[in-house]
Image (cartoon, rainbow, N blue to C red):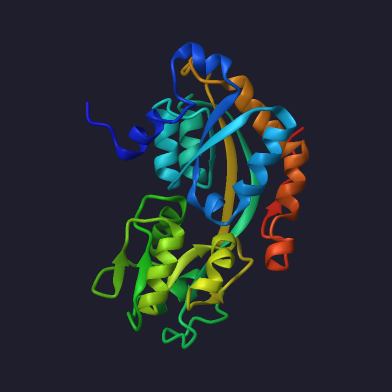
């Protein structure tokens, strides 16, 4: 059987040994999205979780679509993603036993300071994407089946548009690389707020559309896989991480994240589940 590069990488992680090792070693594999890695959130969250519990976390940061596939294949103990439709589908199929909506960020549109499409300050996604579709500057898409990529497609569809042409570029890569390409081409792209703020000093792009309207909401959730469907996974340790970020010290890390680095908190952390 031919395995994907991501699965091959997982096979060499210390977290994925024999079944006996998996049950005894205090370590879990988290399939997550590149945005929580690239913005620096995991650098604060995971060491704090290890200090609190003694459990190490091996993050595999990919697009949310690939992260959910890793969960489906039993190659991750825990999911931390931002693809509500994909997560809910797994829950309905009985592959997940718990999905906790953790925090909200925002999707934003960034682009060249000259803003040839004239979208600066707009809030209506349909108007924003209609102007982008005029092709006055490149639009750089992640093209990687990530949560951001899936959201982008929904926004084009909601605007009644199907992007195509030389102005529309799909790079098949994570958020930071996409931002760099957009900066080099002086084009636009859809980004999550946290990763853009992290990358902002290194890319020649400005934040042009940053609206509180619900259409731009970027919802993150942590999900636990079914012990019945995946008996080999480390469910008890994965559940400790969910507890850590919903009721434990991790929640305050989420609340404060970005305040020191970016001058303002990045996420709207949701009330903990009862």
Front residue of 162 and 232:
232
Q: Quick check: 167 above or below 116?
A: above
Quadrant in the picture for the N terminus: top left
Residue 247 spot, x, y in % from top left: 77, 36
Residue name at image x 62 percent, y 48 percent: 43
Q: Nearer the viewer, residue 95 or 130?
A: 95
Quadrant in the picture for residue 251: top right
| Percent position of residue 74, x then y | 43, 25
Q: Look at the image and tell me in which quarter the C terminus lies.
A: top right
Q: Where is residue 96 in the image (x, y as percent from the top left)?
A: 52, 27
Q: Which of the 4 image quarters holds residue 137?
A: bottom left
Q: In this view, does 68 lie above or below 203?
A: above
Residue at 48% x, 30% y: name it: 76
194 relative to 257 in the view: left or right: left
Q: How many labels does the image show?
A: 0
In-front residue for pair 72/10: 10
| Residue lying at the far top of the rendered structure | 20
79 with respect to 70 (left or right): right
Q: Position of residue 72 (x, y in %)?
A: 41, 29
Q: Considering only vertical position in the picture, is 233 above or below 41? A: above
Look at 69% across and 36% down and name the residue there.
49
């Amino acid at each position: 059987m031919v395995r994907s590069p991501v699965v091959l990488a997982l096979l060499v992680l210390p977290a994925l040994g024999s079944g006996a090792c998996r049950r005894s070693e205090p370590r879990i594999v988290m399939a997550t999205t590149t945005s929580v890695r690239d913005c620096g959130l995991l650098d604060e969250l995971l060491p704090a979780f290890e200090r609190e519990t003694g459990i190490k976390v091996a993050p595999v940061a990919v697009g949310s679509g690939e992260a959910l596939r890793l969960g489906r294949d039993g190659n991750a103990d825990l999911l931390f993603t931002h693809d509500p439709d994909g997560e809910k589908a797994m829950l309905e199929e009985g592959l997940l036993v718990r999905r906790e909506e953790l925090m909200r960020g925002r999707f934003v549109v960034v682009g060249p300071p000259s803003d040839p499409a004239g979208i600066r300050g707009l809030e209506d996604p349909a108007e924003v994407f209609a102007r982008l579709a005029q092709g006055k500057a490149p639009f750089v898409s992640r093209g990687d089946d990530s949560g951001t990529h899936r959201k982008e497609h929904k926004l084009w569809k909601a605007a009644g548009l199907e992007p195509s042409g030389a102005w529309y570029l799909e790079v098949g890569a994570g958020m930071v690389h996409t931002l760099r390409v957009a900066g080099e081409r002086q084009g636009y792209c859809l980004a999550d707020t946290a990763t853009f703020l992290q990358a902002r000093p290194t890319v020649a792009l400005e934040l042009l559309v940053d609206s509180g309207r619900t259409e731009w909401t970027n919802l993150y959730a942590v999900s636990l896989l079914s012990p019945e469907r995946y008996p080999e996974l480390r469910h008890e340790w994965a559940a400790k991480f969910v507890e850590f970020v919903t009721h434990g010290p991790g929640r305050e890390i989420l609340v404060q994240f970005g305040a020191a680095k970016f001058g303002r908190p990045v996420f709207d952390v949701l009330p903990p589940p009862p």
